[in-house]
Amino acid sequence: MERKRIYLSSPTMHGEEQAFVQSAFDTNWVAPLGPNVDAFEKEMGDYIGGGYAAALSAGTAAIHLAVILAGVKEGDVVFAQSLTFAASVNPACYEKAKPVFIDSEPDTWNMDPVALEKAFEKYPHPAAVIAVHLYGTPSKIDRIRDICKKHQVPLIEDAAEALGSSFKGQKLGTFGDYGILSFNGNKIITSSGGGMLLCSDEAKIKRARFLATQARDPARYYQHSTIGYNYRMSNVVAGIGRGQLLHLEEHKARKNEIYRQYKEAFADIEAITMNPMNPDGDANNWLSCMTIAPDCSVTPDQVMDALAEYNIETRPIWKPMHLQPVFADCDFIQVKEGRSVSEDIFNRGVCLPSDIKNTPEDMKLIISLIRKVFEK
Ligand SMILES: *Cc1c(COP(=O)(O)O)cnc(C)c1O
């Protein structure tokens, strides 16, 4: 018999999700929009502590609308964190902008404010900055925001992996001119698929909802004065999201506990370092990650292979965008030439199983398998 699969991060449902979905069926609100969508937006706004939200079909759609609302146009330069998932950046390319990638700092693995400043010296007028809170760890978002303000450039804050995390007591997703959330299946809560655009400016959110519903002018016939999209969240999907939001804090507490367990279990192995926390922040620990010391002979592949043998899912650290074939012609700004922090993290890192359904036995097995690799 095949061993039970242990996942990196898979959906965890509770029951309320189904009740909200049932109410959508009972009232025949299965079509796009409806009471669950309105309520999900309001409940998320309340949770993150103010501002407005537009529920959308994906986090990627939210980033795309943010890029459009920020005024990004063909040929514009957009600064983007290199160490991220491609969806952070692709929407800038939908608008035919030119990404310039910014290196990470070792302290948070996120956009290095020093590298960002340096990028402004070379490209004084980018159309937007896209910053990410990778794996749920808060970036130095106050410094990044100050730099963007100083240069009067809109900040798009990709908090897709960081719902529930905060920085100096303020929820992530609320620092940028635009914030982005994702409810994709592997995220800390899921609606089966979906995302949200966050903004403190109600007019901007109204504009986003307009663009997301095919940009129909207020006329009796279909009339369009701008290009629209079909990006809205369905009322069924929003029901799942509402049910999940009730359990976000619980998911976060479990993720925090998983990170703590790994950290404690590997404390005596010098070659293992867990992904960094921001002392000014409170992370959701969406994924726990480790890096292997440069002088250690163990490779990330050896760790991943050892776990794969037991049907345990792992993943390399996200491959930086400046190393992606599709972005080969894009510039990359780092603090010290020839010393790419993001590339170093990619080369030495592994994302560990961070599924909140992991049992104590699962965690024990994962930890003992990893320890064994380093004891050889
Ligand atoms: C998941 C993710 C996205 C995209 O969200 P989708 O809902 O899958 O479109 C964007 N940015 C980051 C950093 C992500 O991890």
Image (tube, rainbow, N blue to C red):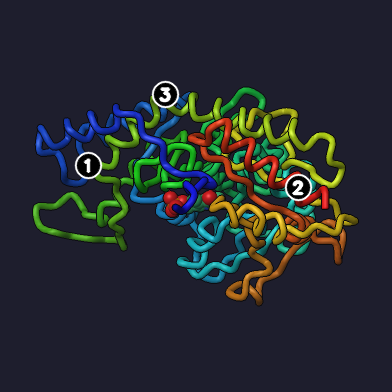
Mark 3 closeness class: few <14, some 14–19, many ≥20 residues within 10 Å: few
| Residue that mark 1 sits on | 33
Q: Looking at the rendered structure, which numbered label has been put on residue 219?
A: none
Residue under the point 85% across and 61% down: 339
Q: CA distance from mark 1 to mark 2?
A: 52 Å
Closer to the camera, 281 or 45? 281
Q: CA distance from mark 3 to mark 2?
A: 46 Å
Amino acid type at circle 1 is Leu
Of circles 1 and 2, which is in front? 2
In the image, is 208 to the left or to the right of 142?
left
In the image, is 221 to the left or to the right of 269?
left
Query: Dots 1 and 2: beta carbons under 8 Å?
Result: no
Residue 138 image position (x, y, % from top left):
65, 37
Of circles 3 and 2, which is in front? 2
Residue under the point 25% across and 45% down: 234
Residue under the point 52% across and 46% down: 6
| Residue that mark 2 sits on | 372
Residue 111 image position (x, y, % from top left):
70, 49
Element carrying mark 3: helix
In the image, is 168 to the left or to the right of 94?
right
Residue 358 image position (x, y, % from top left):
53, 36
Mark 3 or mark 2, earlier in chain:
3
